[in-house]
Amino acid sequence: MTHTYKVTGMTCGSCEAKVKSSLLMLPNITEVEVSKEKQSATITMDKHIALSTFQNALDKKYSITAMEHNETAEQAKSWLATYKPILLIFGYITTITIIAATHQNTFHWMQAMNIFMAGFFLTFSFFKMLDINGFAESYSMYDIVAKKVKAWGYVYAFVELGLGIAYATNFQPLVTNIVTLVVMSISIIGVLQSVFNKRKIQCACLGAVFNLPMSTVTIIEDALMIIMSAIMIYSII
């Protein structure tokens, strides 16, 4: 995609060159044309990049603003494109859960959570298994256990598979939910650290198949499993 931006603060040919080189250094930028006379920069990129990213890349004397596009709308489109795989997965699992947990016009919440968690763990473990080496490598970048014991990345994929089967077969519900609560609570620590420290690393939730960035979406995903398992433990005891 290509967008034209207004860039103020350029006063000479050196400014043009400096703005162009600064923007070209950003990832996913393929071409940049800068004009001091028009006070503009036409940027071609592989995917939409936030205006704040451009501004941070430039010297403070330059200011960049959108000219021909709605920045909010573009960011929304970019967000949807980035997280489309995980949104589709959650949509499918949620739809199946609602259908399976509704009997005679009554929605059974506990059964729904059990079905949702079975679908969640089975699906997410499937994507991890497609490239378990790639998953283990990505997971070791932020998980507090996998950082110290890389083998945990391989074990974790099978733990998710086991939890998915356990929820699907209703095997030892109390034990299953306790394991889920402990495993996901440990997992979310590394996610929180990465997001709060604004580390730009790949999220390994869908293995190495999709290049998903670590974000609040990952926090919500882990937190949802923690909350559901806690509710189910409380209902059992």
Image (cartoon, rainbow, N blue to C red):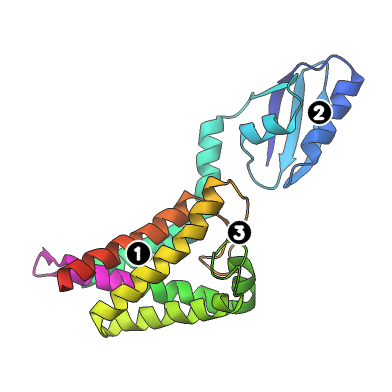
Label 1 SS: helix
Q: Mark 3 or mark 2, which has the lower sequence index?
A: 2
Q: Nearer the viewer, residue 85 or 158?
A: 158
Q: Which residue is mark 3?
A: 202
Which residue appears at 56% of the width and 45% of the height? 78
* Residue topped by disc 1: 225
Disc 2 target residue? 19
The segment highlighted magenta reads 102-118
User: Which sits earlier in the primary sequence, circle 3 or circle 1?
Assistant: 3
Marks 3 and 2 sit apart, C-alpha to C-alpha, by: 29 Å
- Could you say which quadrant of the image residue 6 lies in? top right
User: Alpha-carbon neighbours of circle 2 within 10 Å: few (<14), some, or many (≥20)?
Assistant: many
Q: Residue at x 41, y 77 (%)?
A: 122
Q: Could you say which quadrant of the image residue 100 lies in?
A: bottom left
Name the image quarter holding the C terminus: bottom left
In the rendered image, is residue 21 in sight?
A: yes
* Residue 115, position as x, y percentages in the image: 28, 73
Residues under numbered marks 3 and 2 in contact, where contact means CB atoms less than 8 Å apart:
no
